[in-house]
Amino acid sequence: MPKKNVSKAKEYASPEDTPGFGLRVAISIMSVFGIVAFFIVWLFFFADRFSIYQNVAVCLVAVLAFIAIMAAGWASWGIKYGRKFDKKCCE
């Protein structure tokens, strides 16, 4: 009896079906609300104690931290599953 070609990688119908997708979406949503809350708290309670350059630096660091969280969360998913859902628009 010949062996069936069993693939270890499961085929998914849409990106939402992949493991870890929901967690990444939840982290993305929480990160957006987190950075907005940070900016509100910073601007209302702490910004007046610092110069404009220091405030710009704090905002820049906050945005860079947000980008790092998003990149760390989505890069591994994109590397693993991105090609499976690639839309070929120019065929």
Image: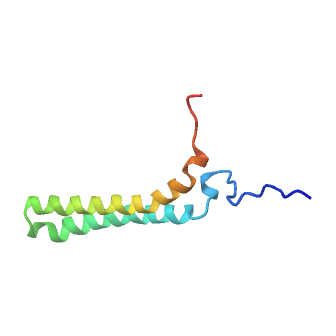
Residue furthest to the left in view is 51
- Report which quarter residue 32 is drawn in: bottom left
Residue furthest to the right in view is 1
Which residue is painted at 38% across and 63% down in the image?
69
Residue furthest to the top in view is 91
Left or right? Give the position of 7 relative to 48: right
Which residue is painted at 88% across and 56% down in the image?
2
In the rendered image, which quarter contains the C terminus?
top right
Which residue is painted at 52% across and 58% down in the image?
77
Measuring from the top left, give residue 20's x and y in whole percent.
Answer: 56, 64
The relative height of residue 35 versus residue 84 in the rendered view (above or below) is below
Left or right? Give the position of 76 relative to 53: right
Measuring from the top left, give residue 16's x and y in whole percent.
Answer: 61, 56
Residue furthest to the front in view is 1
- Colour convention: rainbow
Which residue is painted at 68% across and 51% down in the image?
13
Measuring from the top left, give residue 80's x and y in whole percent.
Answer: 55, 56
Measuring from the top left, give residue 43's x and y in whole percent.
Answer: 19, 64
In the rendered image, which quarter contains the N terminus?
bottom right
Relative to the observer, which residue lies in front, 19 or 42? 19
Q: How many marks?
A: 0
Relative to the observer, which residue lies in front, 2 or 50? 2
Left or right? Give the position of 26 relative to 17: left
